[in-house]
Image (tube, grey):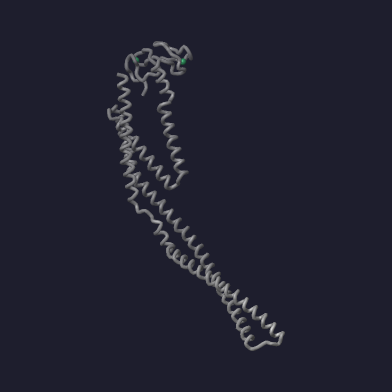
Amino acid sequence: MQGEEVEVTRAEKILAAAFVLFLLIGGVRVLGELREIPAKPLMGAYEARYGIPELERNLSELSIEVQSLEETYRRAQEEHLRAKEEYLFKREEYRTRMEEGSLDEKLRQEYEQARQSYETALRNRDVAKEKLEAARQSLEALKKELFQRREEASRDYRAAMRVYELRVLVLRLGFALPLFIASIYAAQRARQRRSRYAIHANSFMAFSILLLFYMLIEFTWRSFHVIGVSAIGALATGVALAYLKKEYLSPERQAKTRLSQRRCPYCSFPFESGDAYCINCGQRLVETCEKCGAQRSRFANYCHNCGARVKI
Ligand SMILES: [Zn+2]
Ligand SMILES: [Zn+2]
């Protein structure tokens, strides 16, 4: 009979865990649906508000312009070097001929032309360089502007996301909190009435607690990331641990366990039925029943002789 009962209890535990699991699947699904209700901020909308797409277009156009100006400058520089070489050559020739006294009009014209080409090339090169530098400066300014606007847009977006997450949290609390309160009420009633459905009520309570926990973890993750999850997780498990310790490892419970094994509640030394004191540690084990006067265990909930309630 004892063995069978243990089997039933184990089966009950497994079924209760499955019960909680199936409830959780549905609960998490509902939480997911609730997430879709408030309008979710879109990054694109904030970028548009700060004129970022337009700025990006300008930036790409300007980049192309800078590339083309770089090419123009490179060519102007080549032309300048070529014209300079030509000019220096003609000048040398001009000087030599002048010293020889054989300077003619044709050479003079060629020299003059080379000089003018060189001067033009020099001017062209300087103009190209100026234009290129101006365009580069505008490009840098535009990049800086874009960066700044992106910062502003993402700051606004993050603020909007926080509001959105809060709205989702409130909606979800509206769903999970009543479940939680109802489950606590049901579990308490089932316990008081010693209902055979107590395990259902307890499982339902476990479900509602897990759902709340899941919700808080998700919210914290989205809003505060790792640090938040670490804090909430540590807090929740810490509380659960303290609760378990109080419930299952309390001195009273330990004393009861020892007593059921006919061992002293204080020192765990075995005692005989009817012993008034522990022969090992000397603690008193019995007291007089206020109702019938029998010597009953100090740790009894009910008097073994008259059935009077001892502890409330
Ligand atoms: Zn003892
Ligand atoms: Zn009694």
Above/below status of 276 relative to 61: above
Please state the horizontal and vertical placement of residue 148, each as a whole percent of the image.
Answer: 49, 60
Taking the image as shown, residue 304 lies to the left or right of residue 145, namely: left
Q: Please report the residue visible at 65 percent of the width from the left and 88 percent of the height from the top.
A: 104
Please state the horizontal and vertical placement of residue 53, each as a whole percent of the image.
Answer: 42, 63
Q: Please report the residue visible at 41 percent of the width from the left and 59 percent of the height from the top.
A: 46
In the picture, which quadrant includes the C terminus?
top left
Q: Nearer the viewer, residue 204 or 7?
A: 7
Residue 262 sits in quarter: top left
Residue found at the far left of this picture: 196
Q: Nearer the viewer, residue 26 or 183?
A: 26
In the picture, which quadrant includes the N terminus?
top left
Taking the image as shown, residue 145 lies to the left or right of residue 186, namely: right
Q: Is residue 185 visible?
A: no
Residue found at the far right of this picture: 99
Taking the image as shown, residue 117 lies to the left or right of residue 29, namely: right
Please state the horizontal and vertical placement of residue 124, each as a whole percent of the image.
Answer: 56, 76
Above/below status of 3 relative to 38: above
Residue found at the far bottom of this picture: 105
Q: Nearer the viewer, residue 94 or 211?
A: 94
Residue 264 sits in quarter: top left
Above/below status of 45 relative to 93: above
Q: Nearer the viewer, residue 187 or 9?
A: 9
Q: Is residue 277 visible?
A: yes
Please state the horizontal and vertical placement of residue 265, each as a whole percent of the image.
Answer: 43, 18
Taking the image as shown, residue 7 lies to the left or right of residue 266, namely: left
